[in-house]
Amino acid sequence: MSIPTKMLAVAFQHAGNADTLIADYYPTPSLKPGHVLIKVVAAGVNRPDIMQRQGLYPAPRGITSIFGLEISGHIVALAADVKTLTIGDSVCALVPGGGYAQYCLANAQLCLPVPEHTSLIHAAGIPETFFTVWSNLFDRAQLQKGETLLVHGGTSGIGTAAIQLAHAFNISVITTTSSDEKCHFCKSIGAIAAINYHTNDFVTAVKELTQGRGVDVILDIIGGDYLPKNIKCMAPDARLVQLAVQQHPKSEINLIPFLLKRLTLTGSTLRSRNDTFKAAIAQALQQQVWPLIAAKKVKPIISHQFSLDDAPAAHNCMEKNNHTGKILLIP
C-alpha cells in the first residue's frame, strides 16, 4: 500500500485544558532501526496523556509531541533488521508517544500479536495498562497466589486490568470505587468485595473484610490523604504500589507502622524505562497473560470510543470519571 507523507494526528500548542488538543496534519514518521510503522486502527487514552496535556508529565527527550502511549493496527513498513514481524501483521503495541495518529512508529520488541478472542480495535486498550499492572503487581510487589490485593479506582483502565489478572491468579481482590453501580461491575469481573468510598470508610471496610489483618498488596492511583489510610489497611510485610497521584503528590504519615509492620512503599513510571526493560514485560505478558485472554478469563474492558478529532471529548470523559474501563480513539 502507498504510505502518505502526511497524516492526521493530535498534539497541543501549550499546557491547558482539553480544548488545547488540536488535530492537524503532521509528517508521517520515518522508519528507524528495530522499528515498524503501524497504520493505527485505535489508540488508548490514559491518565499520563491528561498529565502531559496539563504540563505535569512532559514527553521524554526526543519523543514526538503527538499524544498516545498504546495502539493497535496493521504493520505497513518495517526496518531491515526486524525479522520477527512481517508487513500486514495485526498487532498491539506500547509506544513512548505518537499513538493519537493515523500512523505510528513502534519498537518491534514492544509489538504483540492481537490476543485470541479480542478485536483489533479493543486490543488498543491492552498495552499501557497491562504492561503497567504486570510490572508493578507481579514483578515489583511480587503479588502471590493466596494473597489479598486492594485496588483503588477499580473501574479505571488500571483497575479493571488489575482485578481481572489478580482474580485469574487466585488472588483475592478488594476494590474501591465511586458508586454502587461501579461496585457491582467490579465484582462481576472478579473482585470479592467492592467499597463505595462515597458512602463507606474504606479503612473500616477493609479491616472488617480481612478480620483485622489487612491486605498484602495495595495498588493506588490516588495519593494524597490515601497514603496514611492505606498504611492502616496493610498487613505485616505488605507492599504499597503507588502508580499515580490523582489527588495530591504530598502526604504526611506516621512512620512507626512502617517499622513495626515491615512495610514496603514502591512506585514507578513506565514511559521513561528503556525498551529492553519493556521488552521483558512484553515477553512475560505473551507467556502468562495472552493464554488467559485466549481462555476468556481476562479481557480489555472498553468503555467509550471517540474519533481522533474528538480527542478533547475523550479527555473530558476521563477527567470526569465518566468511564468504566478504557477510552479509545479511532483515526
Image: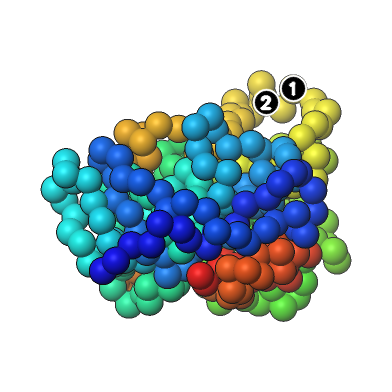
Front position in the image: 231 or 133 = 133
Q: Do the residues labelled 2 and 1 touch (CB within 8 Å)?
A: yes
Q: How crowded is mark 1: few (under 14 residues within 10 Å), some or many (20 or more)?
A: few
Residue positioned 66% across, 44% down in the render: 52
Residue positioned 60% across, 26% down in the render: 262
Residue positioned 79% across, 48% down in the render: 16
Quarter holding the N terminus is bottom left
**Mark 2 residue type:** Phe
Identify the residue position indicated by label 1 in the image.
256
Front position in the image: 239 or 312 = 312
The image's colour scheme reads: rainbow
Identify the residue position indicated by label 2 in the image.
258
Q: From the top left corner, tell me how far across and down residue 153 is, in percent.
A: 67, 58
Return the mark for residue 24: none
Question: Seen from this angle, which residue lies furthest right?
Answer: 199
Q: From the top left corner, tell me how far across and down residue 290 is, in percent.
A: 30, 62
User: Left or right: 215 with respect to 72?
Assistant: right
Image vertical order of residue 91 relative to residue 36, above or below: below
Q: How crowded is mark 2: few (under 14 residues within 10 Å), some or many (20 or more)?
A: some
Residue 330 in view here = yes
